[in-house]
Amino acid sequence: MKPAITFVAVFMCIVSILPSCGNTHIDDELKKDGIKALGKIIDGSGKSGKYSEHFDITVEYQDENGTDLTVSKSITRDEFKSFSKDQKVLLVYSKKNPSIIKILATPEEVLEYTGLKERDMAIADLNALATTKKENVASLLNTVNYGWEKSKDSAWINERKNQYVSVFPELKMVVFVSGPDEYKRFQDLAKQAGLHETAPLVEGETVKKSYENDSLYIGLNMTRDVEKRDIGNEYVPIVTEHEVFLSVITFRKKGPAITKKH
């Protein structure tokens, strides 16, 4: 009987490691030849029972040739909880088989699969943006975090990070809009850079502070907004509303404005 038990144990071991080997091969391929793309989660479902569970999402994205693709991908329970419908995500896909994708959900995964070390926006970045030519703004922003696209003539948006930048080179000014944590973080950055507070805290519809020195001005606003989200489906439309807080950082270099040449 022992040989039979040994055989079963070995067989179970082989079966259990095969998927891992396959995943390793796919991961290696994506790290070597994977192509970055922005995708959007358009659907998802999950089933959980006593002995098994299964979760998947459906992602749409456009490949490097401009072809629209829709891919379903199995994910873990924790990943399923972290995603939402219409969420923008960064992914890499296989050039050989575009249906093979990997969603890069953490800065560590972004670095591992793309070589891009994402970070928070810094005062130095806003300083550089203030006088950057418009055709170079997107490439500069994408060195901070990936996913920036031109929205309007002077505006760029990163839907993946829920961030927005508007650049006015002639005024040497940048407006950066992000989540509520940036309000406090930029207070700390301004103090660390040696800027002094010039306007006390003002509360009302917005919460405002400002910092400056001889060459720079940074204005900080915390604003409230209402975000609408469609959580229904094609049969039952359900639109929810909830209050969101946004940090609005206005950065300006002091000195005469740049006169546009006609």
Image (cartoon, rainbow, N blue to C red):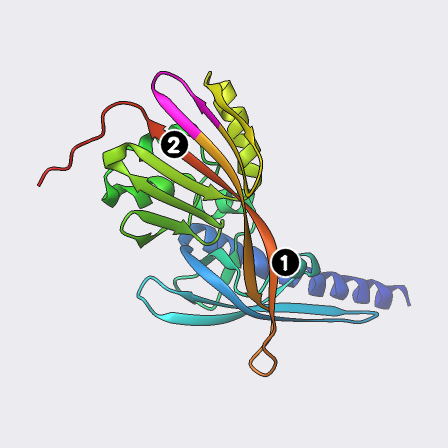
Quadrant of the drawing holding the C terminus: top left
Mark in the foreground, 2 or 1: 2
Which quadrant would residue 227 be assigned to in this image?
bottom right
Whether residue 256 is situated above or below residue 116 in the rendered picture: above
Q: Residue at x 51, y 20 (%)?
A: 191
Residue marked by disc 2? 251
Residue 146 in magenta stretch? no
Whether residue 69 is situated above or below residue 187 in the rendered picture: below
Q: Residue at x 48, y 53 (%)?
A: 160
Q: Which residues are magenta?
A: 210-218
Residue 163's mark? Answer: none
User: Is 80 positioned to the left or the right of 135 in the image?
Assistant: right
Q: Secondary structure at mark 1?
A: helix
Give the amino acid type for the residue marked by disc 2 in the picture.
Answer: Phe
Residue 190 rendering spot, x and y as whole percentages: 48, 23
Task: Determine if residue 148 is in view.
Answer: no
Name the outermost residue toward the front.
204
Q: Main secondary structure of the magenta part?
A: strand
Residue marked by disc 1? 20
Q: Secondary structure at mark 2?
A: strand
